[in-house]
Amino acid sequence: AQSVAQPEDQVNVAEGNPLTVKCTYSVSGNPYLFWYVQYPNRGLQFLLKYITGDNLVKGSYGFEAEFNKSQTSFHLKKPSALVSDSALYFCAVRDITGGGNKLTFGTGTQLKVEL
Amino acid sequence: GAGVSQSPSNKVTEKGKDVELRCDPISGHTALYWYRQSLGQGLEFLIYFQGNSAPDKSGLPSDRFSAERTGGSVSTLTIQRTQQEDSAVYLCASSSGLGRSYEQYFGPGTRLTVT
């Protein structure tokens, strides 16, 4: 089965500093990877995806992610964090096991950006 | 354009009662998904509809859960004889089902509380 792991429950960073939220994956075949963000009492918002092509993927709100096949990682990054980036971030992988088509999510990482 | 909508936003029900949760996907999206988000279990896939194909029900936790999608658009998730462990946020998502547009767009969710 496909899976992703987010090793950090929480990441704290000062506003203006770069941020990284980590994700590693375990898949058979080519990975289709996604990042979503969830603000309090809201649904999940799509940030970016990696399907194929360039290893550096750019997404919404200035976020980007780097696909690293040798390290089986797909870390989310932003060069300069904002307080408004504080939210819950989920990494996900497309899982077509059994002919289905679903997203399997990591456990989430709470990002806190402080002044 | 309009995103995925869900109703009700909150539902409180007594143990043993049946509940129906509704999802309106993005217009034109052929794929529709239900997920459940709870503190103990994280984000779990429940069921997936794609066009006129038979749904992938592999994530439904028990036979008390069922879902239908009428006319290829609106979907209803039904939970019969609710139990306290059914308390969670139920999220609906849709995707276009075209090409490599695998990203899913989520609604705001229905928070279900079983007392």
Image: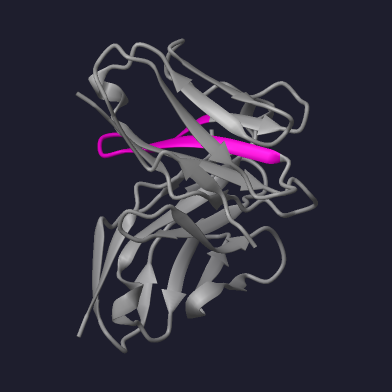
Bounds of the magenta segment: B31-46
Q: Is residue B58 above or below residue B30?
A: above
Note whether B32 is above or below A114 in the view shown.
Answer: above
Question: Looking at the image, which residue is at 66% across and 48% down?
Answer: B95
Q: How many marks?
A: 0
Taking the magenta stretch, the answer to whether it contains residue B102 is no
Residue at (65, 62) in percent of width and height: B1
Residue A98: image quadrant is top right
Q: Position of residue B29 (x, y in %)?
A: 71, 46
* Residue A27 makes an appearance in the image: no
Q: Considering depth in this image, is A109 or A46 the residue closer to the camera?
A: A46
* Residue A63 to residue B114: above or below: below
Residues B27 and A106: in front is: B27
Which residue appears at 44% of the width and 50% of the height?
Answer: B108
Vertical relation: B9 (above or below) B78: below
Q: Position of residue A89 (x, y in %)?
A: 38, 59
Q: List the single residue furthest toward the bottom.
A: A16
Quarter of the image where the C terminus of chain B is located:
top left
State left or right for residue A53 relative to residue A3. Answer: right
- Expressed as whole percent of the image width and height from the top left, the position of residue A52 reads 71, 61
